[in-house]
Amino acid sequence: MIMKAFLEQLKGYRHLINKQQLKTLRGQALAGDVEGARKGLQKILDRKMSKRDMFVNAHRGARYMKDADYSAQFALNLKYIHKLEKMKAGD
């Protein structure tokens, strides 16, 4: 049950972390080390995101939206990511 809950939680971070990190954390949880995967996720989220990663992740969040305008969704995702980075910097 704990593993299933973590995998559901991990889906919510798809637009903030890259594919390789997502696959690594998912594999770690499936192997039974859910606590280690949680620690890894927290460590990834605490890191400062590069500008390139911000754009890539905003694009990944916007490109599969079926009922939304891509450019508007991209702008919203980018704004959201910038807001998160500012909040992390303010801690």
Image (cartoon, rainbow, N blue to C red):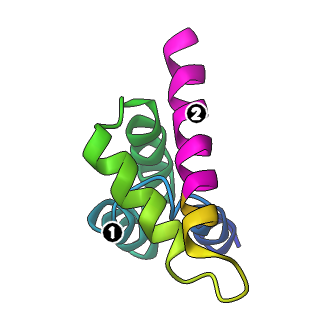
Q: Is the residue under label 1 in contact with that under label 2 (CB below 8 Å)?
A: no
Task: Tell me: residue 65, above or below residue 27.
Answer: below
Name the residue carrying label 2: 84
Badge 1: residue crowd in 10 Å (few <14, some 14–19, many ≥20):
few
* Residue at 50% from the left image edge and 59% from the top image edge: 34
Figure quadrant of the N terminus = bottom right
| Residue 29 at least partly seen | no
- The location of residue 84, given as percent across then percent down, is 58, 33
| Quadrant housing residue 27 | bottom left
Figure quadrant of the C terminus = top right
How many numbered discs, if any? 2
Q: Which one is in front in this view, the residue at disc 2 or the one at disc 1?
A: 2
SS state under label 1: helix
| Labelled disc at residue 66 | none
Residue 82 is covered by the magenta coloring: yes
- The location of residue 39, given as percent across then percent down, is 45, 41
* Residue at 63% from the left image edge and 63% from the top image edge: 72
Badge 2: residue crowd in 10 Å (few <14, some 14–19, many ≥20):
some
Q: What is the distance, in whole Å, between disc 2 and disc 1 at their CAs?
A: 19 Å
Residue 15 is covered by the magenta coloring: no
Label 2 vs 1, first from the N-terminus: 1
| Labelled disc at residue 19 | 1
Which residue lies most toward the top here?
A: 90
Q: Which residues are magenta?
A: 75-91
Amino acid type shown at disc 1: Lys
| Residue 13 at least partly seen | yes
